[in-house]
Amino acid sequence: MGGAVVQGAGGLARGGDPGIDALEKRIGVVLDDAYGLLERPPEQVARGAGFDALDAAIGEVVDDLGTLLRERAEGGGSRLVALATNLVELQGLHHELREHHTAQRLRALTSVHDALARLRGIDTTAKLIERCPQEVCEGCGFERAVISRVVNSEWFISNAHYSHDPQWARDFVEFSQAQAHPRLDHMILETEMIRRRAPALVPDATADPRSYKPLVDHAQVRSYVAAPIMPAGRVIGFLHADYRFTRRAVDTVDRDVLWAFAEGFGHAFERAVLRERLQAQRTEIHRMMRATEEIIDDLCNAEIQLSAVTESESAAVARTGASIFVAPHSRLDSLLTKREVEVLSLMSDGSTNAAIANELVISEGTVKSHVKHILRKLRASNRAEAVSRYLRLSIREER
């Protein structure tokens, strides 16, 4: 490429567009000629520099050519023609590069839409966090991606993905979890993203004072983009992504792509949280309904058991109404068994079921059963009413 002004801008071919390589070569040749006309050594645009660096390099040369052309406009001659020709050609390539950049952005945003569509079928937050970094890489074109969460102003790495080295992702998560979790109350990039609620592009992670150096150094990050995850306007986590294998620099397209994905992921995550809450509430309602059914069944079974009395008990029950309301001279022992009379007598003294069980040397469950029968036979709704009727019958019988 002549003076090697453009040493393969690298990741511009994002999305599998082979035409960018030919465009970069043409730009390199014309830039070489431009630097010759400007009579200065060519400036290198390093491999992997991305669109922003190449766009800036072309823009600078175009401005210099325009200035030189205006200064020598009166002189004429072949040099002036060469300057004008080179300027027009470079402006055309600059326009072509920007058109490619716009098309690239549209393709990338379409990829984001497709990646988010694949996440919509996931119904739990845990599975979303597990799948998210993979979709950032495979769906949006990055090589490494990390998802993290914010809890009580502390920053935790949750999951990572590296297309070329899955083991690295697992090791990175383990490394980050073994470190002291950074607090987001001092000026690191993540704190700034919470404050600004906007994505970030870090062209030089090592030199940028905002980058969190323990993780940057361990991951050997050159440049990266980051975006906050903020459903309902509150930052709950972050996405970070870069290019480790090809070592190309990130650019504004990468930043915008990750930002668009983070916004969509935030909505998907919020839906999953709501689904989980609704599921938990539905489970609780079902549990309460089952408990209510069991209580009703117990009451129905108790009613059936109380109704299934012996023939002599049936006769006693049949006489109960008359005994209480129209036949005060009936004896208690015609209504209740001897044991039930004993239990009722102790109930009239204010004894609890436990005290009655201890006095009669029977189980508390047996006492409860006797109390149920007593209430049934005396047509009493509670213990106090049963005792009241017991005392009334006792007084009448004494007369």
Image (cartoon, helix red, strand yellow):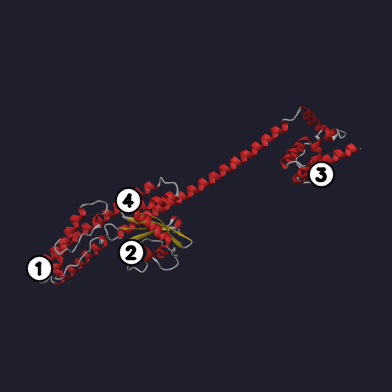
Q: Position of residue 364 (x, y in %)?
A: 73, 42
Q: Amino acid at mark 1?
A: Arg
- At 39% across and 50% down in the image, what residue appears? 131
Q: Amino acid at mark 4?
A: Glu
Q: Earlier in the sequence, mark 4 or mark 1?
A: 1
**In 3D space, how far apart are the residues under numbered discs 4 and 3 (Cα atoms)?**
80 Å
Q: Earlier in the sequence, mark 2 or mark 4?
A: 4
Q: Quadrant of residue 193?
A: bottom left
- At 62% across and 39% down in the image, what residue appears? 294
Please state which of residues 56 and 354 is positioned toward the viewer in this rendering: 354
Front: mark 1 or 2 = 2
The secondary structure type at the circle numbered 3 is helix
Q: Quadrant of residue 359?
A: top right
Q: Amino acid at mark 3?
A: Ser
Q: Position of residue 86 (x, y in %)?
A: 14, 63
Q: Is residue 377 visible?
A: yes
Q: What residue sits right under mark 3 in the picture?
A: 348
Q: Earlier in the sequence, mark 1 or mark 2?
A: 1
Q: Amino acid at mark 2?
A: Val
Q: What residue sits right under mark 4 in the picture?
A: 138
**In 3D space, how far apart are the residues under numbered discs 4 and 1 (Cα atoms)?**
50 Å
| Residue placed furthest toward the left | 77
Horizontal side of 23 relative to 303 (left or right) equals: left
Horizontal side of 210 relative to 2 (left or right) equals: right
**Label 3: few (<14), some (14–19) or many (≥20) C-alpha neighbours in 10 Å:** some
Residue 79, numbered circle: 1
Please state which of residues 94 and 251 is positioned toward the viewer in this rendering: 251
Q: Position of residue 242 (x, y in %)?
A: 32, 58
Front: mark 4 or 1 = 4
The secondary structure type at the circle numbered 2 is strand
